[in-house]
Image (spheres, helix red, strand yellow):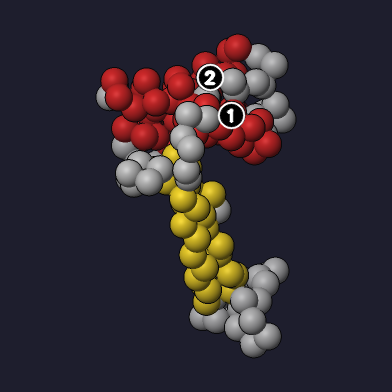
Amino acid sequence: MNREIKDWITTEFETLDFNSKRLETRFKTVINDLSDQPDKSIWLATGSRTNAKAAYRLIANEKCTKQNILKAHKNATHNRSKNENILLAIQDTMAVNYANHTKTENLGYNCEQNLGINVHTCLLLTPQGIPLVLQL
């Protein structure tokens, strides 16, 4: 386990609230496992069939919501940025073209004629270039 990543996960998700300490601990464990081996599947990254099953159960749990995860992430971002007088919000937009995905259903359009999406990103930095958050 990479100590630096584990410390970041602990700080980043300090305010995570699934109304279950067991689920919150499992979430941090799964995030750590996936961070250690981002190129691996959940099965390989978690190290065992039991851990993979626990990860999939976590993902399927109704208490494990995107809103709860993002709320903790926003709280951590606020804490990192509260002592900064100046923050830089670097924005970019890109168009992702799915025109070759003709058999995929329910795709939107990034313009009037092309299947795809427009992705708007924003990277929050200190004036020294230290990243605080990437917002998609």
Q: Give the mark nearer the N terminus: 2 vs 1.
A: 2
Work out which quarter of the rendered image holds the N terminus and state it: top left
Q: Residue furthest front?
A: 85
Assess disc 1: are there few (<14), some (14-19) or many (≥20) residues with their C-alpha within 10 Å of its C-alpha: some
Question: Which image quarter: residue 41?
Answer: top left
Quarter assignment of residue 17 = top right
Q: Position of residue 73 (x, y in %)?
A: 55, 33
- Residue plotted at (53% across, 19% down): 14
Q: Which residue is nearer to you in this view: 87 or 24?
A: 87
Q: Nearer the viewer, mark 2 or mark 1?
A: 1
| Residue underneath mark 1 | 75
Q: Helix, strand, or loop for circle 2?
A: loop
Q: Residue at x 59, y 20 (%)?
A: 15
Tag of residue 33:
none
Give the Cα separation between the discs numbered 2 and 1.
Answer: 9 Å
Residue 31 horizontal/vertical position (percent): 45, 30
Q: At label 2, which amino acid type do we have? A: Glu
Q: Is residue 101 above or below residue 33?
A: below
The picture places residue 96, in percent across and down from the top left corner, at 51, 72
Instruction: Give amino acid for label 1.
Output: Asn
Q: Do the CB atoms of the residues marked 2 and 1 lie less than 8 Å apart?
A: yes
**Residue at x 36% of width, y 34% of height:** 35
View extreme (bottom): residue: 113
Is residue 32 found left or right of 96 in the rendered image?
left
- Residue 39: where, in percent of width, then height? 33, 45
Q: Secondary structure at mark 1?
A: helix
Q: Which residue is mark 2?
A: 14
Residue 47 in view in this figure: no
The residue shown at (60%, 23%) is 16
